[in-house]
Image: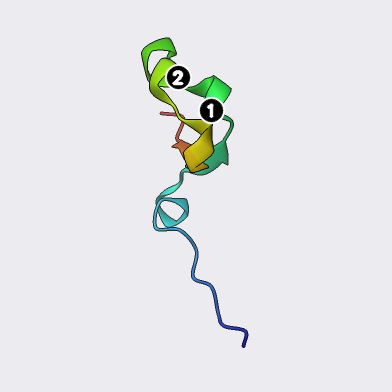
Amino acid sequence: MGGTRTPHPLLERGFVESDPERLPERRRARYNPDRRSKVFVKDL
């Protein structure tokens, strides 16, 4: 059964999905790829 997917709330606020390599070093060291968490960034 298919459904309508709503956009991620951060996308609606100008963030874009990015690669974990773009994270600051300290955050990147704690990033767990097994969780498959998405990384969002916004240039200010």
SS at badge 1:
helix
Q: Quadrant of residue 1?
A: bottom right
* Residue located at (56% from left, 21% from top): 21
What crowding class fits label 1: few (fewer than 14 Cα within 10 Å), some (14-19), or many (20 or more)? some
- In this figure, which residue is indicated by the disc labeled 2? 28
Which amino acid lies under the numbered mark 2 shown in the image of this protein?
Arg
Task: Give the vertical position of 18 relative to 28 (above or below).
Answer: below
Q: Nearer the viewer, residue 5 or 11?
A: 5
Q: x, y (%) of residue 11?
A: 47, 52
Residue 33 coordinates in the image, percent (x, y): 53, 33
| Percent position of residue 26, x then y | 37, 13
* Disc on res. 9: none
Horizontal side of 31 relative to 18 (left or right) equals left
Q: Are marks 2 and 1 in contact (CB under 8 Å)?
A: yes
* Element carrying mark 2: helix
Q: Residue at x 41, y 28 (%)?
A: 44
Q: Is residue 11 visible?
A: yes
x 53%, y 22%: residue: 22
How busy is the neighbourhood of tag 2: few (under 14 within 10 Å), some, or many (20 plus)? few
Q: Residue furthest right?
A: 2
Q: Residue furthest top?
A: 25
The residue that mark 1 highlights is 20
Q: Amino acid at mark 1?
A: Pro
- Is any atom of residue 38 visible in this view? no
Residue at screen point 43% across, 16% down:
29
- In 3D space, how far apart are the residues under numbered discs 2 and 1 (Cα atoms)? 7 Å
Q: Is residue 34 above or below residue 31?
A: below
